[in-house]
Amino acid sequence: MFQQSRRRLIIPFVAPQFILYTIFVFLPLVATVFYGFTDWRGFGNAWEWAGTRNFHIIWNDGNFHKAMRNAAYLLAVGGLIVFIPALFFAWALQTSIKGHRFFQFIILSPLVIAASVAGLMWKWMYNPTQGLINPALEGMGLESLTRPWLGDPKFALTAIIIASAWHGLGTWVLLISAGIDQIPPDLPDAARTDGSGDWQVFRYITLPLLWEVLRILIVLWIIQALQAFTFIFVMTGPYGVGGPLSSTEVMGTYVYKMAFTDFNWGYASALATSMLVGILILSLLVNRLTFRETIEY
């Protein structure tokens, strides 16, 4: 009787979240998958069942294939730019270095800036005539490195990746630091007592015990990177989103163009569904490949 009363008490607390999740997540997801099988052109237009035609078009859509390659580049390069410094800073901030609080502030302060604001700030910094980066390079005698960063197809995506990594680095530092905090301090202390250096402690103790946290963060990064949109939209938009010459076009921006520029909502829904399935499969695959037996400590 008491257990039944407790279960009834849970319902008023769970119901609001369940209703909100259903309205804003589950129903739009179902609608997206459904409209991917239609030729819908947006609200106010009739639609007809198209079957798998939209998905067949995706196989031959060179623009989407280029967007996938750009997304893969963002995933790989952005992962290196984010995880290596984040791992180093998280580990370094665990030690008693001078200026600990100052470095912590420098790393975490970008988190309080909205992504759209950060994108506009970096867009201005990359400006070849009014920004800060080219004049700084010229002041250091590196004129050969100056260029129209966001106007050069060879460097535009890399420039956006750097801006995005700067903004999100603090998040990954915090998450990795939380994982390091879970490691019993007796283990690295004992290793140092036996004569191990900091690098040996990090490589043979910290990194193996941190692996479970890292593999989860890698999957989260895959999900985030393949859905990249905000920085690219702010720094290349609103009219030239994905430019120049589609060099910064990723899957998210291509879906946006199909929906809000071409008003081909049926095809955009098919693209979004394909993204969902692709991200799910890749995440499960990476999670499987990086699985290791849990280390007890």
Image (cartoon, rainbow, N blue to C red):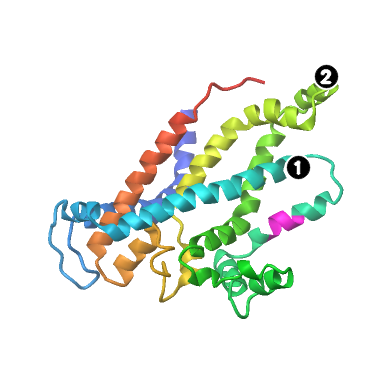
Q: Position of residue 292 (x, y in %)?
A: 52, 24
* Residue 17 position (above or below residue 193): below
Q: Which residue is mark 2?
A: 194
Q: Is residue 65 left or right of residue 135?
A: left
Secondary structure of the residue carrying tag 2 is loop
Mark 1 belongs to which amino acid? Answer: Ala
Q: Residue at x 50, y 44 (%)?
A: 220
Is the residue marked by circle 2 packed among few (<14), some (14-19), or many (20+) residues within 10 Å? few
Element on which disc 1 rests: helix
The magenta segment: 105-109
User: In this view of the protein, can residue 27 be seen by the observer?
Assistant: no
Q: What residue does disc 1 label?
A: 92
Rendering coords of residue 190 (x, y %)? 81, 21
**Residue drawn at (24%, 67%) of the image:** 264
* Mark identifier at residue 70: none
Magenta stretch holds residue 113: no
